Image: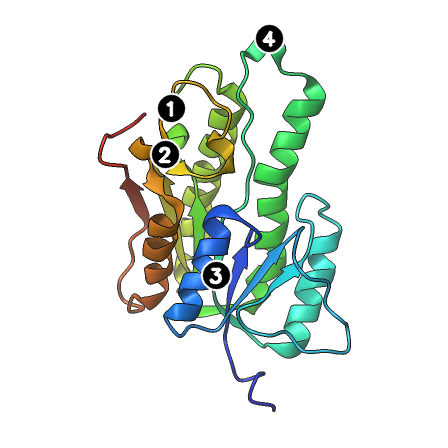
């Protein structure tokens, strides 16, 4: 067995930008072995090994790509120590202006991709591993012109609650984080919101990465955190 096969890296899904990119960078600074995936990642040569700290290409909204990626990961590593689910999109319109195509595309990325990746990655998780899902304040509260986003974030929270009970006997931790406004691309162009009122993306990524350092016996199942101004 090679030295890399003995490693149990952390996977960061959605590492191409924003929160996921920051988490991957901060895991590296913490000395953690981590691999990123996103649709904008580098294309991996099938003959080469995965390198820690790199973001590899896998379009999570094309759910057929996910099993193939996980299979290639499994050929090099027998297990993972954790997975961060940081990908997602926003859809902010009055409900009567949302098309069915927009609605479906939103749920394919925000929920279908999350389900498929979770299902495929489970064989790589051993006792003590963790799954970290990002919901939102929109996962427990409603906001105008956010029906699709609130619905998908509530769905993520519900999925994680049930999965937590399902995986508890196996010793796998399921953590749900409900962040308030973190300044990412999702906020650009939206009127009535000030960047200075939000959590800087690198501050949030830095904090999120520290969840990987918790002892196995510590289990923060659900975490709510907000910018200093509160819910925006």
Q: Which quadrant holds the N terminus?
A: bottom right
Mark 2 or mark 1, which has the lower sequence index? 2
Q: Which residue is nearer to you in this view: 23 or 9?
A: 23
| Dot in front, 4 or 1 | 1
Q: Which residue is at the far bottom?
A: 1
Crowd around label 4: few <14 · some 14–19 · many ≥20 (10 Å): few
Instruction: Say which residue appears at 46% left-offset and 39% top-offset.
Output: 184
Dot 3 or dot 1: first in sequence order is 3
Residue visible at 29% across and 65% down in the picture: 214
Q: Quadrant of residue 106?
A: top right
Q: Are marks 2 and 3 in contact (CB under 8 Å)?
A: no
Say whether marks 2 and 1 touch (CB < 8 Å).
yes
**Is 168 placed above or below 111 here?**
below
Please report whichever mark, 4 or 3, sits nearer to the chain's N-terminal start. 3
Disc 2 residue crowd, few under 14, some 14–19, many 20+, Cα 10 Å: many
Give the residue displayed 68% in from the left and 76% down from the top.
75
Residue 181: mark in rendering: 2
Can you identify the residue that label 4 sits on? Answer: 96
**CA–CA distance in space, label 2 to label 1:** 10 Å
- Sequence-wise, the earlier of marks 2 and 3 is 3
Q: Quarter-wise, where is residue 22 in the image?
A: bottom left
Mark 3 and mark 1: Cα distance apart in space: 27 Å
Q: Which residue is mark 3?
A: 24
Mark 3: which secondary structure? Answer: helix
Vertical order, 64 against 212 (above or below) = above
Mark 1 Cα-neighbour bin, 10 Å: few <14, some 14–19, many ≥20: few
């Amino acid at each position: 067995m090679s030295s890399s096969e003995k490693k149990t890296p952390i996977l960061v899904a959605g590492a191409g930008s924003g929160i996921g990119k920051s988490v991957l960078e901060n895991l590296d600074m913490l000395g953690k072995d981590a691999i990123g995936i996103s649709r904008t990642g580098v294309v991996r040569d099938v003959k080469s090994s995965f390198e820690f700290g790199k973001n590899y290409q896998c379009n999570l909204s094309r759910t057929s790509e996910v099993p193939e990626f996980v299979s290639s990961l499994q050929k090099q590593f027998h297990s993972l120590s954790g997975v961060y689910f940081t990908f997602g999109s926003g859809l902010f319109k009055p409900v009567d202006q949302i098309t069915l195509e927009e609605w479906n595309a939103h749920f394919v990325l925000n929920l279908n991709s999350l389900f498929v990746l979770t299902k495929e990655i489970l064989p790589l998780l051993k006792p003590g591993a963790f799954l970290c899902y990002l919901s939102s304040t929109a996962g427990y509260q409603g906001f105008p012109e956010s029906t699709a986003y609130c619905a998908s974030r509530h769905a993520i929270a519900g999925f994680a609650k049930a999965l937590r009970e399902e995986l508890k006997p196996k010793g796998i931790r399921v953590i749900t984080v409900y962040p308030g406004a973190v300044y990412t691309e999702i906020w650009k162009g939206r009127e009535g919101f000030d960047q200075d009122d939000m959590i800087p993306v690198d501050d949030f990524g830095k904090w999120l990465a520290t969840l990987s350092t918790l002892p196995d016996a510590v289990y923060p199942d659900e975490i709510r955190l907000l910018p200093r101004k509160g819910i925006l």
